Amino acid sequence: MNALPSVRERVPDSPRDDPFDQCASGPFVLGHMDLNPGNIIFCPKGPNAGKIVSIIDWEISMTVPLWCLVCYPLWFDRVSAGVGRDAIEAQYFKDAYIRELQKHAEEAFVLHVVQNKQYEARRRLAEIATLPWDAVEDMERWLENNPGRR
């Protein structure tokens, strides 16, 4: 299968001009774009043990629509490229993420964005469409799991 043309054909399936899209015109936020446990430095001991001290590796950061930032991180579903995570373990990560957002998000809209399937599908399409050519297995898996609207 030639995955890249199939992914490109799927782009029109992602609604871009949806009048109910609350994120279409912003807010736009700073996105790290490589946020994973290896780029988070935690305090190792003392009263702040386990608290985040720093986030490193910002060279591919950019401004993005809110839906691109607050959806579930890819590493919730994958241990590494091509290696999926156990579904129960992935759900634990997602549940913990939602609990933390409920505690810290100042606007309920953030929870709506994370739990919205349409925004999640857009983010996954954007991630898949920008993968390097050698990640064709990830593209094919995405195509299998996300049939088009035709």
Image: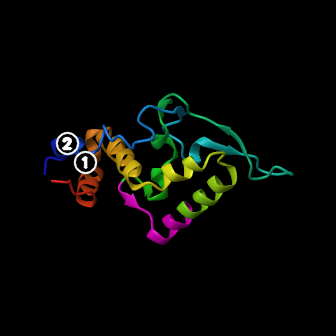
Query: How far, Cα to Cα, is label 1 from label 2?
Result: 8 Å
Dividing the picture into quarters, in which one does residue 20 lie? top left
Label 1 sits on residue: 136
The numbered disc on residue 105 is none
Residue sitting farthest toward the front: 19
Q: In the rendered image of this protein, does residue 137 appear above or below residue 68?
A: below
Tell whether label 2 touches label 1 (CB within 8 Å): yes
Q: Is residue 92 magenta?
A: yes
Residue 98 is inside the magenta segment? no
Q: Residue flagged by tag 2: what amino acid is it?
A: Leu
Q: Residue at x 55, y 52 (%)?
A: 111
Residue holding disc 2:
4
Q: Nearer the viewer, mark 1 or mark 2?
A: 2
For the point 29% across and 40% down, the residue is 129
Q: Is residue 57 left or right of residue 134?
A: right
Mark 2 Cα shell of 10 Å, populated few (<14), some (14-19), many (≥20):
some
**Residue that extends furthest to the right in the rendered view of this protein:** 47
